[in-house]
Image: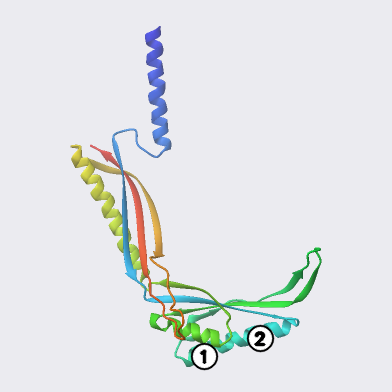
């Protein structure tokens, strides 16, 4: 009776392991789990600069008109400098009452705050500083961020993807050979693209009327996990 109980216990254990493997997406037969990773860098060849103009006035119409006038002046100055108007994106105007709160919890209205976001794509990185100077002279009072990018980003994403796939196959073949086995069919693939990100931040030279910005390199990464059956 004791022997039968042990056999029954082993049978339940094997069944449990099989179910767990299936729940994890792994086959019950001999298999190899491998991963591939690739990272390539490309020099940035474009930048998107985001600005904001924020003004407060007791009259909401005056606040709105002043903000719109400064955005229009910025666009006109850019076109005069040789930039294309279609590269400028002006967000919708936000107009909200601005309150000042006292220590006793009461408040009074200071006026109306008009806010508008503006961004421009710059295809010549050496002109980033010039665009910022034009924006500030036109009355835009905040530089939100400078985001560097690559025009042909999809080509670099494909290169990283192909290298990650090749890396997963190469790793799997090396491991199988080391243990005297042969790779079989692919059982499952989990594709985990990592996207792209800048390698380092831009820097601005202090004490100069002409801002100097260091172009970034953009890093493209890709990852894949593969489960191979073994023979």
SS class, disc 1: helix
Position of the C terminus, as image quadrant, is: top left
Whether the residues at callouts 1 and 2 have beta carbons within 8 Å, the answer is: no
Q: Is residue 93 visible?
A: no
Direction from residue 163 to residue 107 in the image, left or right: right
SS class, disc 2: helix
- x, y percent for residue 180: 18, 37
What is the CA distance from the residue labelled 1 to the residue labelled 2?
16 Å
Among the 4 quarters of the image, the one containing residue 26: top left
Identify the residue position indicated by label 1 in the image. Answer: 77
Identify the residue position indicated by label 2 in the image. Answer: 66
Q: At 39% from the left edge and 56% from the top edge, which residue is drawn?
A: 193
Q: Nearer the viewer, residue 186 or 75?
A: 75
Q: Residue furthest front?
A: 207
Among the 4 quarters of the image, the one containing residue 14: top left
Q: Residue furthest bottom?
A: 80
Relative height, residue 208 to residue 100 (above, below)? below
């Amino acid at each position: 009776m004791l022997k039968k109980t042990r056999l029954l216990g082993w049978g339940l254990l094997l069944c449990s392991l099989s179910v767990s493997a299936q729940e994890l997406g792994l086959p019950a037969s001999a298999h190899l789990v491998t991963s591939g990773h690739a990272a390539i860098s490309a020099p940035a060849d474009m930048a998107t600069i985001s600005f904001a103009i924020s003004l407060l006035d007791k009259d909401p119409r005056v606040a709105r008109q002043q903000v719109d006038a400064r955005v229009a002046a910025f666009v006109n100055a850019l076109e005069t400098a040789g930039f294309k108007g279609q590269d400028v994106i002006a967000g919708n105007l936000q107009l909200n009452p601005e309150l000042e709160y006292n220590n006793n919890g009461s408040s009074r209205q200071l006026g109306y705050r008009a806010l508008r976001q503006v961004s421009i794509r710059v295809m010549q990185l050496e002109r980033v500083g010039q665009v910022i100077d034009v924006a500030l002279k036109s009355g835009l009072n905040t530089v939100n961020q400078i985001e560097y990018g690559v025009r042909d980003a999809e080509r670099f994403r494909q290169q990283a993807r192909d290298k990650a796939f090749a890396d997963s196959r190469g790793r799997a073949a090396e491991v199988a050979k080391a243990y005297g086995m042969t790779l079989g069919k692919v059982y499952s693939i989990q594709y985990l693209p990592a996207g792209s990100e800048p390698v380092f931040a831009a820097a601005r030279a202090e004490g100069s009327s002409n801002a100097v910005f260091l172009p970034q390199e953009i890093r493209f990464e890709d990852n894949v996990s593969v489960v191979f059956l073994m023979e």
